[in-house]
Image (cartoon, rainbow, N blue to C red):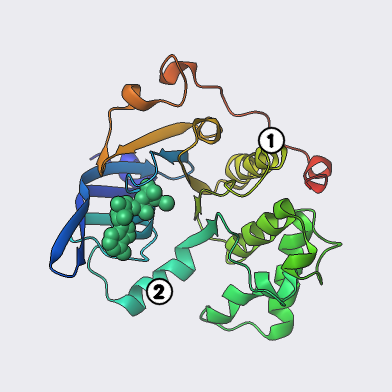
Amino acid sequence: MDSWKRFMELIELKDICKTYRLGDIDVPVLKGVSLQIARGEMIALMGASGSGKSTLMNILGCLDRPTSGEYWLDGCDVSALPADERAQLRNQKFGFVFQNFNLLPRTSAMDNVAMPLSYTAGHLSERQARRQAREVLERLGLGDRLHHHPSQLSGGQQQRVAIARALVNHPPLIFADEPTGNLDSRTSTEVLRLFQQLNAQGGITIIIITHDATVARSARRTICIHDGLIEDGAACAPSDTGPEAATPPAAPPSPAELRGIR
Ligand code: ADP
Ligand code: MG
């Protein structure tokens, strides 16, 4: 591999398999996944329900380990790291966004966003952590919702709080697992535009996991998974006429538009 390619490469998976064990039965879910992701990409990981998307995201996000295969992250083999080192890596490198937002109830937006900072080495004071959380929330247009609890926010606002929480540690990579699954179509579009903006302007690598071709179209590249295997791109592009016809990402939204997200 030439040095430029090595510099650009963020992730390489080589023949990753994951088999769950249920009682006496082996359940093979990932059956030899190989792929590469470069810094700054915005990718949709698409496949039907049950195809193995979340299992793959859990491995990519170092939430789980593969049964076999190699996972190279930033030039290091992380396939077999123990749990504590994986936790440290997650904290430094990844932000996670989930379908159901996963916010702490009865906790303000600001404290939800500040929460990951309490796990970070170098310990910020509580005041510094809250200031950092406030800054990110303001950037995402939620400056007037800092003290609201999740139940006092709309779905789109809750997901923006979750995105702020994913951003607060300045990770180079964000995983979003069905991030628009609980949102109406207009709010979904706005959340996807926010991801596009973070990718285009912030240079953050974004991987959106989805079963929905409309969502996948907001990414620049689609990786399709079918029954635990990566499919040939042309066979599963999120458009009727192949990957070339996929709609390019729309222009990133302005801050004023972002504030308009419901
Ligand atoms: P997707 O996210 O694409 O819907 P998942 O990765 O969640 O798919 O699941 C893929 C398959 O793996 C499913 O058949 C699911 O039942 C199985 N599976 C997922 N997690 C576990 C587990 N912890 N133990 C056993 N089987 C699992
Ligand atoms: Mg899933």
Q: Earlier in the sequence, mark 1 or mark 2?
A: 2
Question: Camera-side residue: 259 or 170?
Answer: 259
Quarter where residue 250 is shown:
top right
Q: Is residue 89 above or below residue 202?
A: below
Q: Tell me where residue 92 appears, x and y as whole percent.
A: 47, 67
Q: Secondary structure at mark 1?
A: loop
Q: Which residue is mark 2?
A: 87
* Position of residue 240 measured from the top left corner of the image (x, y, whole percent): 45, 17
Q: Residue furthest right?
A: 144
Which residue is at 41% across, 38% downward? Answer: 46
Nearer to the camera, 12 or 235 = 235
Please tell me which residue is depicted at 39% across the width and 60% down the height of the picture.
61
Q: Specify whether tag 1 is near ligand 2 (CB below 8 Å).
A: no
Q: Secondary structure at mark 2?
A: helix
Categorize mark 2 by other alpha carbons within 10 Å: few (<14), some (14-19), many (20+). Answer: some
Q: Which residue is mark 1?
A: 252
Any part of residue 77 in sight: no
The structure residue drawn at horizontal position 28% and vertical position 28%, both measured from the top left corner, is: 232
